[in-house]
Amino acid sequence: MPDIESLLTEKRTFKPDPAFVKQANWNRRKAAELRELGEKHPKRFWAKMAKENVTWFSPWKKVLDWKPPFAKWFVGAKTNVSYNCLDRHLDGPRRNKAAIIWEGEPGDVRTLTFAQLHREVCKFANVLKSQGVKKGDRVALYMPMIPELAIAMLACTRIGAPHNIVFGGFSAEALRDRIEDAGAVAVVTADAGWRRGKPLPLKDAVDNAIEGVESVRSVVVVKRCGPEVPMRAGRDHWWHELMADASAKCPPAKLDAEHPLFILYTSGTTGKPKGILHTTGGYLTHVTTTAKAIFDLKDEDVYWCTADIGWITGHSYVVYGILANGTTSLMYEGAPTTPGPDRFWDIIERHGVSIFYTAPTAIRTFIRLGDEHPKSHDLTSLRLLGTVGEPINPEAWMWYHRVIGGKRCPIVDTWWQTETGGIMITPLPGAVDTKPGSATLTFPGVKAAILSEEGNVVKPPNGGLLAIQQPWPGMLRGIWGDPKRYRETYWSKWKNPKDTYFAGDGAHKDKQGYFWIMGRVDDVMNVSGHRIGTMEVESALVSHAKVAEAAVVGRPDEITGTAIVAFVTPIGGTEAGDTLVAELRRQVTKEIGAMAKPADIRFTDALPKTRSGKIMRRLLRDIASGKETAGDTSTLEDLSVLAKLRESDEG
Ligand code: PRX
């Protein structure tokens, strides 16, 4: 019996458009050569990428020092991330090109050229120094999506003070945990940020979070929305006041390749959040190389990644990987549906966005809202689309391809994690045929496999556990302050070989070697002895024309061990009743087989999601089996969704 059964077969294949291939940064030939180099000599491959894509102040003595599970990349080399994102673009035509085009939720727009951004970053680096922040000190950033967030990040990298960004939607308690665990000495925040037409207060939460936290000496506050906020004398300072006096001269610190760059907290199902540590040279090499190859970045592009910078996607592919390539990065402050359901498409049209990178959860929301919204805008500036964060159901992929991409844009479905730092499994848009729902192949220089619980390679098309089999430059270097947990969580699944990274995802490979991510291993359902992943059943449900989104979980069942319960969000205006239930059960039987047919189907307007948009199946499991909600709900985006689901259960 395989670890996870693979039930869904997707036959559609899309070849890269010849016109796209012709201009691609990595065409088939280049991709094939680099793939071969990456397979035979991964260290040589990454060293070549590091030389081509990153500017170093001094070279490395050794590409990799690997004492599992601890890695050092580009040993002894010196560089600086802000130098790579800014200074090196100032001597040529990029100097006065837009680095950041920012749009606030109320509609205000600001553009910062590379020269202007450089100036702001140097000034803020001096502000940090004036607040006593030194190389190695941690700085917490709790900010809205405004240019000052990118400025603060780059300023931290300029002086070698690792940042610890906490997403602005987190509560004061979550913020306190993260500030305390990281031992931050300063906090940068704003009075508030705009979200759905209202100011979302931030400074208040900071005040509560740092009460009694001794490490924090200074708080810098950006005035964004204008509400009165209490300022504590000696500790709190206005951003604009400190910046007014700051010098614009600040040479970049020459930092060791392994100097800590940032800590970013990620929460698992249990236990306290893990402070994922990333360092300088390897991370920069990984994100700069992948961004250039996968997003096919060109000087003319306007690139827009909709992720909040508070997540890894925003770190790697709103800021660092994009600016290091000298590409214009668009940043948007607010909600996707404010003031109307077409806000994203309006932004794409007005700014001429050419590359668009978003999450499946957003795509499914737009499917539910209706095609008329994207169709009322001119989206012809788009030339490439991407997705990240969850498996994309094939029908959602097809919608993205057709309605947003006008059937001409390649789609890169990129698999990676906070821990991997950068993209690991992905199409190369000018070189790899795509299949809806598959993240396709590993990026050159990355080695992955599907393993069984025992560590044997699982043969296609069976499913198993996704494993990374050799170190990569963007890999996490540890969990802040907890080397034991680092080893146990990621490097102890298999005893032999002991240097294999456990990603926690289920996946299978097809005969062509394409990877299909099947969902988190913790969510796998065991129905009558068949181990079924969530992704395939959900995709079968979403392939019904009236379904926008679906989540499946198991609940205990006397006969089958586990019975499948489906929570389904229909497309707007659909009548959800017994007829649809019967149709959906037939659909699943037809697409993947009777054993995966849901025992219960429940309709809901909304699913419980994390603040970054991932469905929280753990909570649905409790509801499906009539249990109280156990475990942490602090990462839940909207608590009322749970109450509603429970009400419908009783009703
Ligand atoms: O389960 C996988 C899913 O997101 C997890 C990582 O989450 P996080 O650390 O928040 O980072 C998200 C942004 C990189 C993975 O373990 N995931 C991410 N991308 C994909 C995906 N699942 C399927 N397909 C993807 N493209």
Image (cartoon, rainbow, N blue to C red):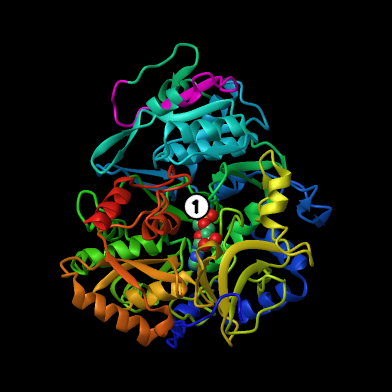
Viewer-proximal residue among 366 and 128:
366
Residue on which the image places disc 1: 94
Left or right, 434 with reference to 338: right
| Residue 40 in the image, given as x and y percentages of width and height | 77, 76
| Residue 200 in the image, given as x and y percentages of width and height | 32, 35
User: Is residue 118 shown above or below 432?
Assistant: above
**Badge count:** 1
Q: Quadrant of residue 448?
A: bottom right
Which residue in the rendered view is the most extreme toward the top?
233
The amino acid pointed to by label 1 is Arg
Asked whether 224 falls inside the magenta stretch, the response is: yes
Q: Is mark 1 within 8 Å of ligand 1?
A: no
| Residue 555 in the image, given as x and y percentages of width and height | 43, 64
Left or right, 311 with reference to 398: right
Q: Quadrant of residue 454?
A: bottom right
Secondary structure mostly taken by the magenta-highlighted segment of the chain: loop
Alpha-carbon neighbours of circle 1 within 10 Å: few (<14), some, or many (≥20)? some
User: Is residue 376 shown above or below 629?
Assistant: below
Residue 544 appears anywhere in the view: no
Q: What range of the chain is rendered magenta?
A: 209-228
Left or right, 210 with reference to 591: right
Residue 149 appears anywhere in the view: yes
Look at the image and tell me in which quarter the C terminus lies: bottom left
The residue lying at 45 percent from left, 41 percent from top is 167
Asked whether 30 falls inside the magenta stretch, the response is: no
The residue lying at 37 percent from left, 56 percent from top is 626
